[in-house]
Image (cartoon, rainbow, N blue to C red):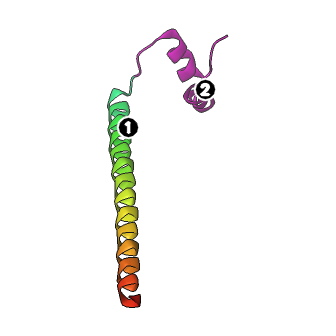
Amino acid sequence: MRTIRASEIGTYIYCQRAWWYQQRGEPNQNQAELASGIEIHEQHGKAVIVTGCLRILAVGILLFALALLVYALTLQLL
C-alpha cells in the first residue's frame, strides 16, 4: 500500500494535470520558483532555530535572576 503525502494531495487539488505529470516523473517547468521556495523555507527554518535558542537563553537568564533574588532576600533575613 502506497503512502499518500499531504503535498501530493495539495498538488492534486491545485492542478490534477500537475499531479499526473509528477506521477510520471516529468520535470517541473518552474525550477526558479521551486528554488526560491526552498531558499525561503531554509531561511524560515534557521529563524525558528534561532528563536528557540533565544527562548532557552531567556529562560536561563530568568532563572538566574530569580536565584539572585532569593539569595539577596536570604541575606537580608540573616
Q: Mark 1 = which residue?
A: 37
Residue occupying image coordinates x 38% and y 72%: 67
The quadrant of the picture occupied by the N terminus is: top right
In this rendering, is residue 40 above or below 74? above
In this rendering, is residue 48 above or below 66? above
- What is the x, y in percent for residue 57? 34, 60
Q: Quadrant of residue 69?
A: bottom left
Q: Quadrant of residue 76?
A: bottom left
Residue occupying image coordinates x 34% and y 39%: 42
- What is the x, y in percent for residue 78? 38, 88
Residue 23 lies within the magenta run:
yes
Q: Which label was assigned to residue 59?
A: none
Q: Nearer the viewer, mark 2 or mark 1?
A: 1
Q: Mark 2 = which residue?
A: 12
Q: CA distance from mark 2 to mark 1?
A: 19 Å
Return the disc, 2 or 1, that comes first in the chain's sequence: 2
- Highlighted range, magenta: 1-28
Q: How many marks?
A: 2
In the drawing, does residue 16 fall left or right of residue 70? right
**Quick one: label 1, few (<14), some, or many (20+) residues within 10 Å?**
few
Report the residue that reaches farthest toward the front.
78
Secondary structure under badge 1? Answer: helix
The amino acid marked with disc number 2 is Tyr
In the drawing, does residue 30 fall left or right of residue 10? left
Please say if the residues under marks 2 and 1 sit with CB atoms less than 8 Å apart: no
Please tell me whether the stretch drawn in magenta is mainly helix, strand or loop.
helix
Q: Nearer the viewer, residue 21 or 75?
A: 75
Secondary structure under badge 2? Answer: helix
The amino acid marked with disc number 1 is Gly
- What is the x, y in percent for residue 75? 35, 85
Residue occupying image coordinates x 37% and y 46%: 44
